[in-house]
Image: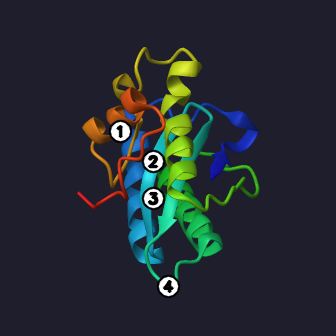
Amino acid sequence: MTFCANQRRELFVDADVVQEALAQILQSAAGDGFAVVAYCFMPDHLHLLVEGVSEDADLIAFAKDLKQRIAYRYLRKRAGPVWQKGFYERIVRDDEARLTVAKYILENPVRKGLAREPRDYAFSGSSVWTWDQMMEMWQTDGVTIGRPTPR
């Protein structure tokens, strides 16, 4: 999933803003039946790879919930709309594709010149994999490391 900031403003450059937004995402994910496999806050957009972990997981409800939560918290401290309308989504159906998407998301700051290594970027990570497990993805490139387990 990709969520773009309104008018592509650079909203996610401050650690406090990102931490608050991440807290809201994790709360929404827990309430809506999702695990956050990978996340990356780029300055003007957010990438998420989520996995439904309950039978009643609803992606549309989750997206709406997290956008509302983040906007509410952001607007309490700053003015102006937070998000562009809608979001982009892509359904990933197998483990190998999921690992490829996670790798793409977590390497985004490196491709954009914001970090030398994925691990160096403070505004990305996973709620189900440790950084050591994620780094194994890059070192083994294409070797499945197994299904994520909650930390």
As measured in the structure, the alpha-carbon distance from the residue carrying label 2 to the one carrying label 3 is 12 Å
| Helix, strand or loop at mark 4 | loop
As measured in the structure, the alpha-carbon distance from the residue carrying label 4 to the one carrying label 3 is 19 Å
The residue identified by callout 3 is: 25
Q: 21 or 108, which is in the foreground?
A: 108
- What residue type is disc 3 on? Ile
Report the residue at 55% width, 33% height from top: 42
Report the residue at 72% width, 53% height from top: 88
**Discs 3/1, front:** 1
- What residue type is disc 2 on? Ala
Report whether 75 appears left or right of 84: left
In primary-sequence order, the first of circles 2 and 1 is: 2
Are discs 1 and 4 less than 8 Å apart at CB?
Answer: no
In primary-sequence order, the first of circles 2 and 3 is: 3
The residue identified by callout 4 is: 55
As measured in the structure, the alpha-carbon distance from the residue carrying label 1 to the one carrying label 4 is 27 Å
- What residue type is disc 4 on? Glu
**Discs 4/3, front:** 4
In primary-sequence order, the first of circles 1 and 4 is: 4
Are discs 2 and 1 less than 8 Å apart at CB?
Answer: yes
As measured in the structure, the alpha-carbon distance from the residue carrying label 3 to the one carrying label 1 is 20 Å
